[in-house]
Image (cartoon, rainbow, N blue to C red):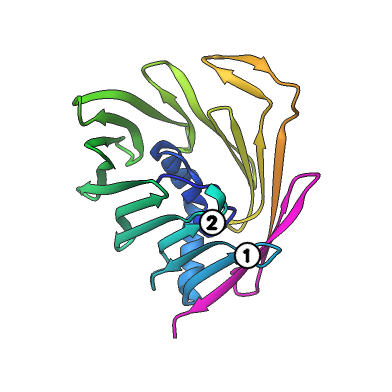
Amino acid sequence: MSSCEVKAQYADYFKITDLRGAFVYDIVMRKVIDKDVHILKENNVKSVVVRGDSGKVTSKFSVNEDGWITNYSTYEYNDGEEINYEITYDGSRPLTIKYKEKGMGINYTCFYKDNHLEYINADFGSKLAEDCVFSFSNKDKIDRIDYIDKLKDTVYMTIHFLYDSKDKLVSTKDIKFDNVIDTISYSENVITINRLHFEEKKYTLNDNRITEEQNTFPSKQLQSKSYSYQTEIPDIVSKYRYYYKDNGLIEYIDAGTDNFKYKYIYEYEYYQ
């Protein structure tokens, strides 16, 4: 629920930098996540190691026998220092998530009521903590998240989730400042998520599998409700093409920009 930027379909949600973004991805990409879990379980995958062109490990993760990731590490940031997530479950429901990197850690604990996520406590250490409290619509969809500062016992932010007539999530909004945070659009086989107007992620799907991913960091930077300036730097566009084995597991990913190309290669260990 905290984040790192790793190109791995199985662990895509680990690159989301906040709870709101993680739940936007979870709602919008739920069928993709479920298909990932099914394929990992069906193939008895125990662990995955992802290597770059040089053979150096860029990330690795462990999978339980139900197909859910229980431990995830990436080494692509902080000069190769490990960033790690440890997750415990009750069936498919996450109970705890421990995030660790050099010099810091966050412990997330999930609380449920009547089969719904009631709130998540985020403990940042040094007596700093917050509760993220969830409200649901009569259609069992997340309606809003209230962020409560535990030290001050006050709600400092409320995010509203908005859906279209087909019950598809189309945007999130910061109620206090009346600002749209995320916008989501859908076409026949493409889902586009625009986060904070600073990053656009476009997923091309086939049978609930990601075949292509395009990430665009725009040169325009958003301030309040209008673009405040435009740099001379063009948009940064990264593209990822996924290649699969016959059993549905990722074999490798071709990635890069127009000027720099690289590859991620997947290695698997299986339950006996």
Give the side of residue 232 with respect to residue 138, left or right. right
Q: Residue furthest right?
A: 259
Q: Which residue is mark 1?
A: 56
Residue type, mark 1 in image: Lys
Q: Is residue 113 above or below residue 253?
A: above
Q: Picture quarter containing residue 199?
A: top right
Instruction: Please state the extent of the stretch shown in magenta in the rendering.
Output: 243-272
Instruction: Please indicate, yes or no, whether residue 248 appears anywhere in the rendered image.
Output: no
Nearer-N-terminus badge (2/1): 1
Q: Which residue is mark 2?
A: 75
Give the side of residue 170 with respect to residue 210, left or right. left
Q: Is residue 97 above or below residue 250?
A: above
Question: Distance of mark 2 from mark 1, alpha carbons?
Answer: 9 Å
- Would you say the magenta stretch is mainly helix, strand or loop? strand
Q: Is residue 236 above or below residue 223?
A: below
Residue type, mark 2 in image: Tyr
Viewer-proximal residue, 175 or 19? 19
Give the side of residue 95 with respect to residue 21, left or right. left
Give neighbour class at mark 1: few <14, some 14-19, many 20+ (Cα, 10 Å).
few
Residue 235, x across and y down, in percent: 72, 31
Residue 160, x across and y down, in percent: 38, 27
Q: Is residue 122 magenta?
A: no
Instruction: Please indicate, yes or no, whether residue 8 appears anywhere in the rendered image.
Output: yes
Please name the residue shown 57% across and 53% down the image. 76
Q: Secondary structure at mark 1?
A: loop
Discs 2, 1 touching: Cβ within 8 Å: yes
